Image (tube, rainbow, N blue to C red):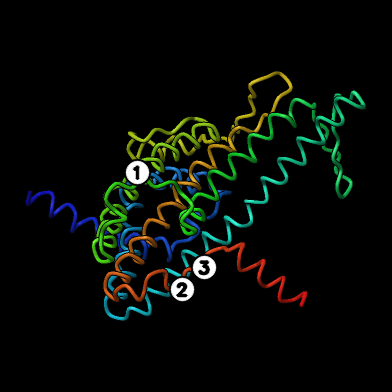
Amino acid sequence: MLDGLIWLVTNIGLGFYNIFWALTNPAAWLDWSDKAAIGRVIYYGGSVEFFFAIFDIFLVLFLLGLWRRQILWGVVRLFEGFANTIGRFFAWAALLMVLQQIMIVFLQRIFRVSEISVGPFGVDFTKDLSWWSEELKLYNAMIVALCCAYTMVQGGHVRVDLFYSGMKHGSRRVVDMLGSLFFMMPTMVLIWLYGWYFLWRHLVTPKINATEAFAMVERKSKILKWNVETTGFSPNGFDAYFLFKVLLVAFAGMMFIQAWAFFFRAYLEWREGPESADKYLDKDSLEDETADRVAEIH
């Protein structure tokens, strides 16, 4: 027990040191012309050091919020605004997916086309029709991965509710805080860890594993080469499946941020009482938009 507490406190302290080191030595991890910098990013992106650096940032924000609640409300609005902006933008991928599917069916059935060429700004991008058909999966993945946090802000996820609706305001907020801390955050950390190395195993060679020591990663980085996965499920099918792995990591990162926003909001609403429920919450409302348009007409 004591050893675990010492480990926790030590890593929290080292997290602040690692943040300071990263900010004062940006070339060590941002200069990707240096293979060693790429190796550091791969290694530390899924490391304990990176976790506690991020944890320290959120811890400081929470402590500032205990001192001035308005600061924490600002953080909540920033995080939720980020999720809403990304989600609202990539939600348009659903329309793009439908339009592309209609185009594929139309060109295939009416004109018997086998290839589709897109050439903006003099660039000739030609792919087989099966490539464009399989690429539709990417739009679906973008909606799922990048709109999940947005849907949570909007309260659009399905909730299996047995006791929650019958609880008082304070009890609900406590359940929200505990759910965020003990379910959402650990789950997103696990997805990030598996997704991070899963991504890089399909981007560079030699492959870097999560169990390797940093000294081994440094030696491997000297012979590091880009080897982006281009294998599809069919001979002429979509060949950029590494993008799905990027989306998996993006999903975990965005949902981890949203878990903190959810925790902060639950804490603030618990402290301020029922009158603060949904305070500053930017929710979409079709009814409000319809009313505004009717008012404009009249």
Mark-to-mark CA distance, 3 and 2: 6 Å
* Near-viewer residue (143 or 230): 143
Mark 2: few, some, or many residues within 10 Å (few <14, many ≥20)? few
Question: x and y percent of residue 3 in the render?
Answer: 9, 49
| 24 is higher (above) or lower (below) than 48 | below
* Horizontal side, residue 61 vs residue 8: left or right: right
Residue linked to disc 2: 280
Residue linked to disc 3: 282
Of the 4 image quadrants, the one containing the C terminus is: bottom right
Mark-to-mark CA distance, 3 and 1: 26 Å
| 268 is higher (above) or lower (below) than 204 | below
Identify the amino acid type marked 2: Tyr
At numbered mark 2, what does the secondary structure look like: helix, strand or loop? loop
Residue at horizontal 32 percent and vertical 38 percent from the top: 213
* Near-viewer residue (293 or 133): 293
Residue at horizontal 39 percent and vertical 32 percent from the top: 209
At numbered mark 3, what does the secondary structure look like: helix, strand or loop? loop
Residue linked to disc 1: 187
Q: Which mark is residue 264?
A: none
| Residue 278 picture quarter | bottom left
Task: Mark 1 or mark 2: name the one nearer the start of the chain.
Answer: 1
Instruction: Residue at the far front: name it.
Output: 298
Identify the amino acid type marked 3: Asp
Question: x and y percent of residue 262 in the render?
Answer: 37, 60
* Horizontal side, residue 108 vs residue 294: left or right: right
Residue at horizontal 86 percent and vertical 35 percent from the top: 117
Residue at horizontal 46 percent and vertical 49 percent from the top: 157
* Near-viewer residue (244 or 95): 95
| Residue 96 picture quarter | top right
